[in-house]
Amino acid sequence: MKKATIIGTLLLATLTFSCKKDECKECHYDKNGGEVELGEKCGDDIATLEADGYTENGVKYTVHCGEGH
């Protein structure tokens, strides 16, 4: 019984951390006083967009993902 509890706990912890890695958020950038939606992005795409921004017609915009931005 103790072995099953330990295995169950490890499995639950693994799934919990895996889900957070692929967390998805709505992303947008600001242009001419309005927001341009980029849609839902997940995992590493969020970090890349927020770090590198979004380029359109040679203009680089700062990207915001998630609520509160």
Image (cartoon, rainbow, N blue to C red):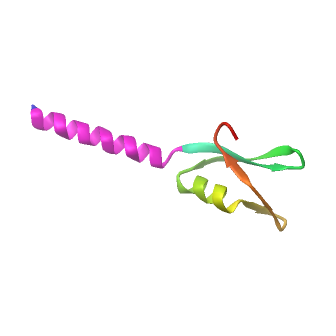
Picture residue at 60% right of the left edge, 43% below the top: 25
Residue 47 in the image: state x and y as whole percent.
Answer: 58, 55
**Direction from residue 5 to residue 67 in the image, left or right:** right
Where is residue 40 shown, x and y percent of the image?
A: 63, 45
Magenta residues, dominant SS class: helix
For the magenta stretch, what is the residue range?
A: 2-23
Quarter containing the C terminus: top right
**Residue farthest to the right, as pictured:** 32
Q: Is residue 10 magenta?
A: yes
- The location of residue 31, given as percent across then percent down, is 85, 50
Question: Left or right: where does residue 42 sit relative to residue 68?
Answer: left
- Residue 17 lies in the magenta stretch: yes
**Residue at the location (49% across, 48% down)?**
22
- Count of marks overlaid on the render: 0
Placement of 22 over or under 9, stated as above or below: below
**Quadrant placement of the N terminus:** top left
Residue 55 placed where, x, y %?
77, 63
- Which quadrant would residue 19 be assigned to in this image? top left
User: In the image, what residue occupies the spot 65% across and 37% down?
Assistant: 67
